[in-house]
Each structure stands twice: as structure tokens, then as C-alpha cells.
Amino acid sequence: MLNIVFLTDSWLTSFKQPGVCITVAMLLRYFFLAVFMWMCLESVHFYLALVKVFNVYVPKYILKCCIADWGRNPAIAITIVITLVLTINKDFYGGGLLSESCPYSDF
């Protein structure tokens, strides 16, 4: 999903709708946080598998990992970050223009 949102980002922003820019930014942040959270949970899994090899049983381990990754942690972080950014200045999302003479201006 991260790749799909990232690849369609420039096409979606061509509609010049501020709500679309904010939605795409929220989705990108959420999926990036989910990817980093999966990496963190994978390191916990490696620790349990390689360091604490014996007598390690966590009931409903996969369910707990999925809830921690897709649900609570990224949702809380994304709510805090998006609310903070939109409170400071709602124009931080979107509004960047590209021109032929300076293709990286305002981005």
C-alpha cells in the first residue's frame, strides 16, 4: 500500500485539492510508520528466536504483533503528528509548484 500511495501521489496532487494532499500525506505517514513498526517487531521476534531460545511462549503472538503494528501505535502517532502539523500551519501539506526553470522549488 505504501508503494501504491507513493506512486500515485504526483497524479493525485495534480487535481489541486487540499483535502487530497492532506489525505495522501496522512496515508504516507501511516504506512511509513507501519513499515518501521514491522521492522521493530521483527527485531523483537529475532531476539526471542535467537537469544531467548527455550521456554518462550507468547499466547496469541501474531495477533498481538498485528494489533501493535497496524492498529494502535501508528494510529496514535499519526494522529499526534497530523494534528500538530495542521494546527501550526495547514499549508504545510501541498501548495508546492514545479516549474521548468527550477524543478525543485517549493517542494
Image (cartoon, rainbow, N blue to C red):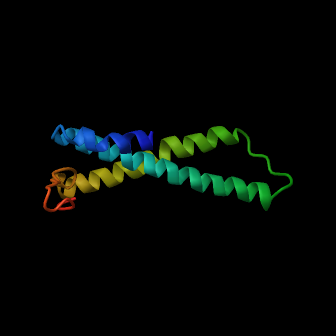
Residue name at image x 75 percent, y 55 percent? 48
List x then y, in percent, for residue 72. 49, 44
Frontmost residue, 17 versus 82 = 17
* Residue at 70% in and 38% down: 60
Q: Is residue 87 above or below residue 13?
A: below
Q: In the rendered image, which quarter contains the N terminus?
A: top left
- Count of marks, rendered view: 0
| Residue extending furthest toward the front | 100
Q: Compared to 52, does 23 lie above or below?
A: above
Report x, y in % for residue 23. 28, 41
Q: Residue 66, percent across and down?
A: 58, 40
Residue nearest the viewer, comparing 67 with 18: 18
The C terminus lies in quadrant: bottom left
Left or right for 72, reference 9: right
Q: Position of residue 106 (x, y in %)?
A: 17, 60
Can you tell which quarter of the image residue 105 is in?
bottom left
Residue at 69% x, 42% y: name it: 61
Left/right of residue 15 with respect to residue 43 in the rendered view? left
Residue occupying the point 16% across, 62% down: 102
Whether residue 63 sits left or right of residue 11 in the image: it is right
